[in-house]
Image: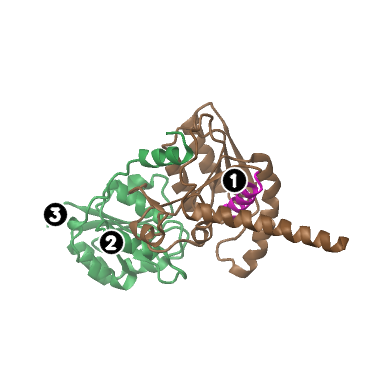
Amino acid sequence: MEGNLALESGILAILLVLVRIFFLVHKVTTGHTKVWHKKRVNAAKTLVCIGSGGHTTEMLCLMASLDFLKYSPRHYVMARTDETSYLKVVAFENEKTKDAKDYFIRTIPRSRAVNQSYFSSIFTTIYSILYCIPMMLRLRPDLILCNGPGTCIPICFIAFLLKAAFICDTKIVFVESFCRTQTFSLSGNILIYIADNILVQWPPLKRKLKRADYIGQLL
Amino acid sequence: MDFKEKRLFVTVGTTQFSKLIETIQQDEILYKLSSMGFKEIQFQVGTGKYEQKEHQVLKLKYTPFFDDFLGEVTKSDLVISHAGAGTCLEVLHTGKPLIVVINEDLMDNHQSELAEQLQSDEYLYFCTCNELVETLDKNLKSLRKYPKPNKQNFSNYLNKCMGFA
């Protein structure tokens, strides 16, 4: 009898978690989380997913117009091997914030290297997800900004699960890369289920996904 | 046709794209360029293997990388580039006419997606190495200037999403 009770409550707990996750996915994909539910007074703790090469340049270009008093502090998360992006971020922050220095750079293991097969990337992704959990538990950002490098997938997933567990209330904003005019990237295709806002840079993508936003030329 | 001494800038960025350099070194193309009024061709060759060919009429110059990439673009009358999004954007922002050459040897080439879109918006022409001669015949003056983006758009959008506005 007691074994049955434990089993039943276990199943119940799993069901509850699944319901919560499906509820959130539904809320996100129907566009109910697009605009924040209340007026925000304090600065938003921002996590920026930085990827390789073109993604980094694009992201920093977008961020150039942001009011950093509103988006502070900023945590840049990037792959451990990415020296070039590191230098770009430091140069960008130095120019934009002068002495404020309200930013941090955090490095994580790569989830998928360029040209790595989809199959083996499953394992590297699991590893980088496990690596990111303690970091995300500590940070609990108000906003995640990402534009499609592999590093953003584990980060967004954990943020989503923490949101499902009522641990943090993170808004995920995904900007599809400028290169993508007709089809979503792999990251985009995954994030359409969990990102609160999806911004695309070309009208054909807006036609593909109703809840995506197109606000004209960004770059 | 004006007879100002024209300069062509060819760039492969950080990619291995010797085929583009070899294509432009062909007599047929060089003859075409010279008849268009070009006097100088500056190649940005990256780290790929290539042969430093000379030409009787045209001045051919080879450099691995430029610190002042934009300066090189501004000095030129036409840019022929690989299909990298970053390079395309940088050149388009200078308002110089641009021909993008797709590297067919790259697998999963979703970069042609961007080039196609930008061509259908008449900001540039794109082609493969084999089609370059015909593409040079196209009217480069009819290309539209790439508009400057309103940088504030993204900031306003994000502020609204976050509940700041």
The residue most toward the bottom is: B130
Q: Is residue B154 within the magenta segment?
A: no
Residue at image x 21%, y 67%?
A: B32
Q: Secondary structure at mark 1?
A: strand
Residue at image x 32%, y 51%?
A: B91
Question: Which three-letter amino acid code belongs to the residue tagged 3?
Answer: Phe
Task: Give residue B98's quadrant in the image.
Answer: bottom left
Question: Which three-letter amino acid code belongs to the residue tagged 1?
Answer: Val
In the picture of the structure, the residue carrying the numbered disc 2 is B119
Q: Secondary structure at mark 2?
A: helix
- How are the residues colored? by chain
Q: Is residue B56 above or below residue A132?
A: below
Q: Is residue B52 visible?
A: no
Residue A77's tag is 1
Residue A90: give x, y in percent of width and height.
54, 38
Residue bounds of the magenta highlight: A152-166
The residues tagged by marks 3 and 1 sit, at their Cα atoms, a distance apart of 53 Å
Circle nearer the N terminus (2, 3): 3
Asked if residue A190 lies left or right of residue A64, the reply is right
Q: Residues within 10 Å of mark 1 (few under 14, many from 20)?
A: many
Q: Residues within 10 Å of mark 3 (few under 14, many from 20)?
A: few
Asked if residue B40 lies left or right of residue A67, the reply is left
The green-tinted chain is B
Residue B84: give x, y in percent of width and height.
41, 58
